[in-house]
Amino acid sequence: MPYIYSITNNINKKQYVGKTSKDNPYDRWKEHIQHAKHKDNTVGYASVHSMPIIRALKKYGSDNFKFRVITECSEDKVNELEEHYIKEYDTYGKNGYNATFGGDGIRKDPEQW
């Protein structure tokens, strides 16, 4: 079952909302931390390092963030729910760490929500 999760910066309170299909959603949190530990020029990680949440983890350190599972959901609802929580928590752009509006990962006009 997929999960929707949030990562909150305890210093500035900005958040990131994500989704994972991993059996244990905390494994996804560990992946974020691992990505933040790699150098920017590491092969295979170039696009990951441009993610605002990864840059924030590098800047503030993972100890200054809280990982939380928001909900477990069905595969057919995961994209819809990710979009919903990105909107609800206002995590896209300057107010948070999401680089897209969620779902399929394509930037969309928020007026379409």
Image (cartoon, helix red, strand yellow):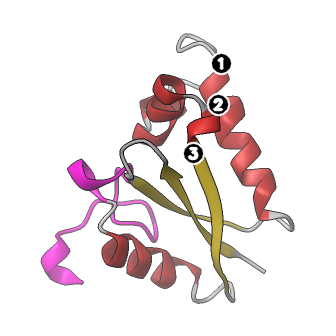
Callout 3: few (<14), some (14-19), or many (20+) C-alpha neighbours within 10 Å?
Answer: many
Inspect the magenta stretch and tell me whether residue 93 lies in it: yes
Q: Which residue is under mark 3?
A: 65
Asked if residue 87 lies left or right of residue 26, the reply is left
Residue at left offset 33%, top offset 53%: 96
Q: Which residue is under mark 2?
A: 35
Asked if residue 48 lies left or right of residue 12, the reply is right
Q: What's under tag 1, amino acid-wise?
A: His
Q: Which mark is residue 38?
A: 1
Q: Secondary structure at mark 3?
A: strand
- Split into 4 quadrants, where in the image is the N terminus? bottom right
Q: Camera-side residue: 65 or 83?
A: 65
Q: Earlier in the sequence, mark 2 or mark 3?
A: 2
Q: Is residue 4 visible?
A: yes
- Split into 4 quadrants, where in the image is the C terminus? bottom left
Callout 2: few (<14), some (14-19), or many (20+) C-alpha neighbours within 10 Å?
Answer: many
Front position among marks 2 and 3: 3
Q: Secondary structure at mark 2?
A: helix
Residue at left offset 78%, top offset 57%: 26
The reply to whether discs 1 and 3 touch (Cβ–Cβ < 8 Å) is no
Asked if residue 25 lies left or right of residue 91, the reply is right
Provide the residue span drawn in magenta: 92-113
Q: What's under tag 3, amino acid-wise?
A: Phe
Q: Earlier in the sequence, mark 1 or mark 3?
A: 1
